[in-house]
Image (cartoon, grey):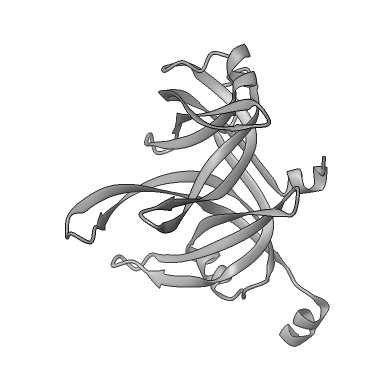
Amino acid sequence: MNYEEMNNNRVTLSGRVAEEAKFSHEVFGEGFYEIKLEVPRLSAQTDLLPVTISERLISSHDVSVGAKLSLVGQFRSYNKIEQERSRLMLTVFARDILEYDEEINPNVIELTGYICKQPLYRTTPFKREICDLLIAVNRAYNKSDYIPCIAWGRNARYVNGLTVGAHVSVQGRIQSREYQKTTESGAQITKTAYEVSICRIVADFTESEIRQAN
């Protein structure tokens, strides 16, 4: 087990189970299920987040609808084919379930990885600065997770100055966001996006980049 790669991607969540467990897939004979966890925000709103959990953990913990739980794990991505197109899917992979604790921050994520797509900077109609970025985070067995992130205000301006390949460390929370999508037939459907809302980001610069900045 590569503990360095485990430390590249760490998530802690606490919340209430909002949807019953549904079978997802099987690996080496062990079944994995997906639940939806309702995680509170400071604003009194909630995020409804997908969590993948093994049957081993389900067998020893209460994950029924309404149950409260805390967990630690990783934010992972995978590709799913829908209508002959590849779609990036995201889920929190639970490594362990902890005793529920109302005192801890209910939604914390720490990532270390590489910017793999040029950051997209924009301003809202209310002049709020936003910057979207995609971070590739190494995982064991030469795999990577591709995690969409969003930065605001001063962080957005900072991220806009970074380039593809920059090595960054991020702290924030995972959020869910509904949006409207127009289908080929012209109908509008409601979809849910998941992303990391950044509260802190730091880039590691090479010696040549430091010399150029000076």
Task: Give the total of numbered labels.
Answer: 0
Locate residue 62, reporting x and y percent. 54, 13
In this picture, is 184 found above or below 164?
above
In this picture, is 167 found above or below 41?
below
User: Which residue is at a point 44% across and 65% down the rendered structure image?
Assistant: 130
Locate residue 193, reporting x and y percent. 40, 49
Residue 76 at least partly seen: yes
Locate residue 93, reporting x and y percent. 60, 36
In which quadrant of the rendered image does the N terminus lie?
Answer: top right
Q: Nearer the viewer, residue 60 or 68?
A: 60
User: Which residue is at a point 75% across and 45% down the rendered structure image?
Assistant: 7
User: Which residue is at a point 64% across and 19% down the rendered structure image?
Assistant: 56
Q: Nearer the viewer, residue 28 or 151?
A: 28
- The image quadrant that residue 17 belongs to is top left
Q: Nearer the viewer, residue 123 or 20?
A: 20
Residue 41 at least partly seen: no
In this picture, is 154 found above or below 210?
above
User: Which residue is at a point 63% across and 41% down the rendered structure image?
Assistant: 74
In which quadrant of the rendered image does the C terminus lie?
Answer: bottom right
Q: Is residue 4 left or right of residue 17?
A: right
Which residue, as the protein is rendered here, is positioned at the far left? 186
In this picture, is 89 found above or below 46?
below
Q: Is residue 76 left or right of residue 211?
A: left
